[in-house]
Amino acid sequence: MATDYDEVRSDVKESQDHSLQALQSANAPDARSVVRELDEADAFDDALVPGGEFVSEELVVQVIPQAQDEFTCYSCFLVRHRSQLAREKNGHAYCIDCEG
């Protein structure tokens, strides 16, 4: 008698059907509720700092313009003193750290 080894065995088929029914009948959340929960969690994350407390202060930063003896490196974009100028090429200045 020939045996078809590609055919699914009856005990495996029954267990697959049973596990599929168990997954379908499980109390799984729908996609909308999952998205809603994630959005609520993101809203809380925006207001928290690593310590866990809420921050309601506004940061005030004073911007100081670039001085005459300073340049902005074209490679690292840091404002450097003219003493750290390594080279200028095509109107772009490069600092010693980026050239070295």
Image (cartoon, rainbow, N blue to C red):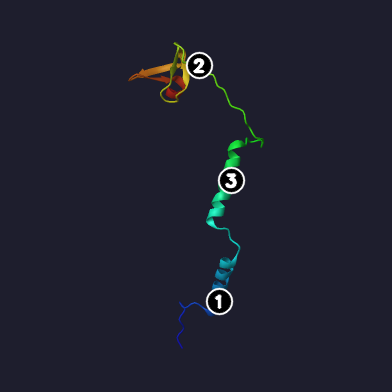
Residue under pointer 3? 40
Instruction: Report the amino acid beneath label 1.
Output: Glu
Q: Where is residue 11 in the image (x, y as percent from the top left)?
A: 56, 78
Q: Is mark 1 on a helix, strand or loop?
A: helix
| Classed neighbour count for the residue bearing mark 2: other residues with Cα under 10 Å, few (<14), some (14–19), many (≥20) | few
Residues tagged 1 and 3 counted as in contact (Cβ below 8 A) = no
Q: Position of residue 49 (x, y in %)?
A: 62, 35
Q: Distance between the residues labelled 2 and 1?
A: 74 Å
Q: What element carries label 2?
A: loop
Q: In this view, does 12 lie to the left or right of 87?
A: right
| Classed neighbour count for the residue bearing mark 3: other residues with Cα under 10 Å, few (<14), some (14–19), many (≥20) | few
Q: Where is residue 4 in the image (x, y as percent from the top left)?
A: 45, 81
Q: Quadrant of the C terminus?
A: top left
Name above or below for residue 38 compared with residue 90: below
* Nearer to the camera, 94 or 24: 24
Q: What element carries label 3?
A: helix
Q: Which of marks 2 and 1 is nearer the N terminus?
A: 1
Instruction: Report the amino acid beneath label 2.
Output: Ile
Single out the residue that lies furthest toward the top. Answer: 68
| Classed neighbour count for the residue bearing mark 1: other residues with Cα under 10 Å, few (<14), some (14–19), many (≥20) | few
Residue under pointer 2? 64
Q: Earlier in the sequence, mark 1 or mark 3?
A: 1
Q: In this view, does 37 lie to the left or right of 98?
A: right
Residue under pointer 1? 14
